[in-house]
Amino acid sequence: MAGDEPPLAKFKKRHIISMRDFTKEEIDFILEVAERLEPYARGERRSNALAGKLLANLFFEPSTRTRMSFETAMKRLGGDVLNMSGVEASSIAKGESLADTVRVISKYCDVIVLRHPKEGASRLAAEFSEVPVINAGDGAGQHPTQTLLDLYTMKKELGRLEGLKVALVGDLKYGRTVHSLAYALSLYGAEIYLVSPELLKMPPEIKEDLRGAKIHETSDVKEVISDVDVLYVTRIQRERFPDPTEYLKVAGSYRITPDMLEENERLIVMHPLPRVDEVDPEIDRTKYAKYFEQAFYGVPVRMALLVTLLEAEV
Amino acid sequence: MAGDEPPLAKFKKRHIISMRDFTKEEIDFILEVAERLEPYARGERRSNALAGKLLANLFFEPSTRTRMSFETAMKRLGGDVLNMSGVEASSIAKGESLADTVRVISKYCDVIVLRHPKEGASRLAAEFSEVPVINAGDGAGQHPTQTLLDLYTMKKELGRLEGLKVALVGDLKYGRTVHSLAYALSLYGAEIYLVSPELLKMPPEIKEDLRGAKIHETSDVKEVISDVDVLYVTRIQRERFPDPTEYLKVAGSYRITPDMLEENERLIVMHPLPRVDEVDPEIDRTKYAKYFEQAFYGVPVRMALLVTLLEAEV
Amino acid sequence: MAGDEPPLAKFKKRHIISMRDFTKEEIDFILEVAERLEPYARGERRSNALAGKLLANLFFEPSTRTRMSFETAMKRLGGDVLNMSGVEASSIAKGESLADTVRVISKYCDVIVLRHPKEGASRLAAEFSEVPVINAGDGAGQHPTQTLLDLYTMKKELGRLEGLKVALVGDLKYGRTVHSLAYALSLYGAEIYLVSPELLKMPPEIKEDLRGAKIHETSDVKEVISDVDVLYVTRIQRERFPDPTEYLKVAGSYRITPDMLEENERLIVMHPLPRVDEVDPEIDRTKYAKYFEQAFYGVPVRMALLVTLLEAEV
């Protein structure tokens, strides 16, 4: 990847499958475009930059937040969206190969957003699609637009991405979100605190990939709070534990409450949502809480990606 | 609520939860705007007054008529809509609090329309939403836009709202539609005939609230037909009756047939739909039948509300 | 149907229920309009010809391809779409007559597209609709827009429709697609090869209707390949066979593989999709394969129909 070509040109007709497909310069470029588009995302300014363009949401698993924020991103810029209903998804899943579905639907639209329960589905879809495919989560695999909006949230709320101290808390074994976020943070020389129960530690092969980062590991969230800029909390799922009482004990000790945060004035709390019980609602209206704003930032970040992939000008 | 402020100003960024939130002046204002917007609702005139605006339909119970008429109202005025699929609704219902859902989705749109099985859901949603919430039915609670379109139908078809004689027929105990319609009619000095089987009589606390109205009660629909301007028929649900033969007897005696209407030339028959068996299809093509027109009137009335809440100019 | 009136005038406000409602001149007209609209269907040119127009997709059975291509056709021309969700469809199916549903929804839109499991549903819907109804498949009945796109594919890929040699392969007994395609081809003096297992032969009453065509019948697909211009393959469903081993034997002998095609250079392979196993994926990237292009052609053909019915100018 030659550095002299402008990032825009390199996005032309490209698929967005994994954070590993992005250079740091490309991430910076998308985040800058996102910042410029924020007033459009908030509905404060209007544009028809994507008029006549169609995005197809192919969600083989439900995901209201991701699907709707893509839809809002298109529609706030004058574009439009084709959605697949749940019944259609299950009917397709039974009767037809993903390759055939993608081959046909890519003829009806300008970009496909795919959420699929099987790892690798997006890579496969990209092979057969005539238009760019954006991976919106494939099983235990990747979900790159989530990572982009996570980075955008940190940049907006903390003013920078270089050298942040970020605690990733909760399920670090199965959570695809934290895997690609950790990778992306490592590009920016982050200091990463991996905070999880023993059973849900980050797998060694993921850790090995974080060369640019300084890594700490612990199972005690209280220990790290005074050190970090970001507490990135994820859900610990009951079904990961063989023993329900063990689950309850662990989940309880990873629950973030307002009193835990008092000692660190500059801290922000993030969460990819939905949350169940791991962030106390008492935190919602404090200055620490950035998870709802984070959900909003999905709109400008996805706008930036769509505008770039579809070569539109805003 | 001071009378000198124009009604429009008082709607700014407001939630629409219950008919009790409206003054009579405000109802009149909405109905007047609706009348002006009818040609747009019929597709005879075009406008882009809501271009760039997004409505999110959050339907946790299916309701094609209500949802689609909101969607038509937005789209005929150049706006756009985010819909939640049934699968998403049930997935959200399982995994996340309504407060969290509303907090996030209100960041993706300009107005939320909520249908929810639990009474009070809309009031709760309004607390957490950054944009106006319109209650499109919450359990046994309220459904104000249905009442507005019912009033609009009477005004259009009978030329006035003051002092109408209206028979409410069928299930007056559980039907939320008739409760808020009776309340609204009482503001216009209506004479209200409550016609229901003993088991499904209007609850005393609702009746007490109809101060401006003259109330009659009976269980015999034939008795009132020659007196009234409007026969507002609702469905009697089988599951309200402990005994199926009792249900059949009652349902049969509340079924409206063409011969019953002959004695009253000026009468109109209304129904919130869907109907099952309570209005004979033989009535459909007579001059009495206004229930399909009533369903259409949902479009201009919802347009009027949206245009007012979103401060658009048509 | 007088020949001097221009075809356009005869489409005004008309329902599209069956291929038998079309004259040959009208088919030609629609295909010509489709050809002119292809650049819009591909997103290469933009138009707002259908701005302000609403199409309601009423799909009581899932059909992603048909539904989405109608949606793309509307949206690429600036129009918009109301979709019914799967949950709504089943809720309506339980609670309300199709006549009532159609009567109301036809007041919310400018054209209805109906897919329904029961034969004759579209004809019934047309009786109660205030706007044109397009049949998108009703049980074992008709699916005229599929036939129009099949004809368009042949015309585009082979340069003409007159006197083609077309093999219809697979389930010729229950497949509604092949029935109306055979009828339409007969208008163009086709030579039709009916290729099916004994159990799934084309019913005599359908065959009798193909007066303009020369008909051959066989159960051996290999026998006809060197003679024909088009191999139109359809799925053979397992449930048609009382005995699973019998099914497997038959399905195997109707599976099209690349080696079978070598002897005929000019041949094209078509399929209404979805396919399961009846066309070997090895054929996909050969010059024979036209089934994905065929799926795309649904967009310009449906555009042509919509533009004509809604009297728009592109």
Image (cartoon, coloured by chain):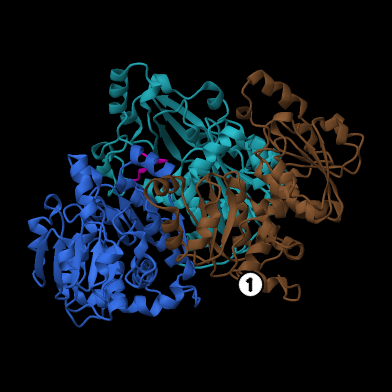
Chain colours: A blue, B brown, C cyan
Q: Amino acid at mark 1?
A: Ala
Query: Is residue C270 magenta-colored?
Result: yes
Q: Position of residue A313 (x, y in %)?
A: 41, 78
In the rendered view, does B197 fall on the left or right side of A154?
right
In the rendered view, does A177 fall on the left or right side of B188?
left
Q: Secondary structure at mark 1?
A: loop
Q: Which residue is mark 1?
A: B312
Q: Chain of mark 1?
A: B
Residue at horizontal 70%, vertical 63%?
B40
Which region of the structure is painted magenta? C266-275
Q: Position of residue A173 (x, y in %)?
A: 16, 53
Q: In terms of image quadrants, where is residue C254?
A: top left
Q: Nearer the viewer, residue C301 or C85?
A: C85
The correct choice, above or below, for B272 with respect to B57 in the image is above
Q: Nearer the viewer, residue B97 or A139?
A: B97
In the rendered view, does B266 fall on the left or right side of C222?
right
In the rendered view, does A220 fall on the left or right side of B293?
left
In the rendered image, the quadrant that contains the C terminus of chain C is bottom right
Query: Is residue A102 magenta-colored?
Result: no
Q: Position of residue A133 (x, y in %)?
A: 31, 59
Q: In terms of image quadrants, where is residue B232?
A: top right
Q: Is residue B144 visible?
A: yes
Mark 1 packing: few (<14 Cα in 10 Å), some, or many (20+)?
some
Q: Is residue C152 visible?
A: no
Q: Position of residue B34 (x, y in %)?
A: 73, 62
In the rendered image, the quadrant that contains the N terminus of chain C is top right
Q: Main secondary structure of the magenta part?
A: loop
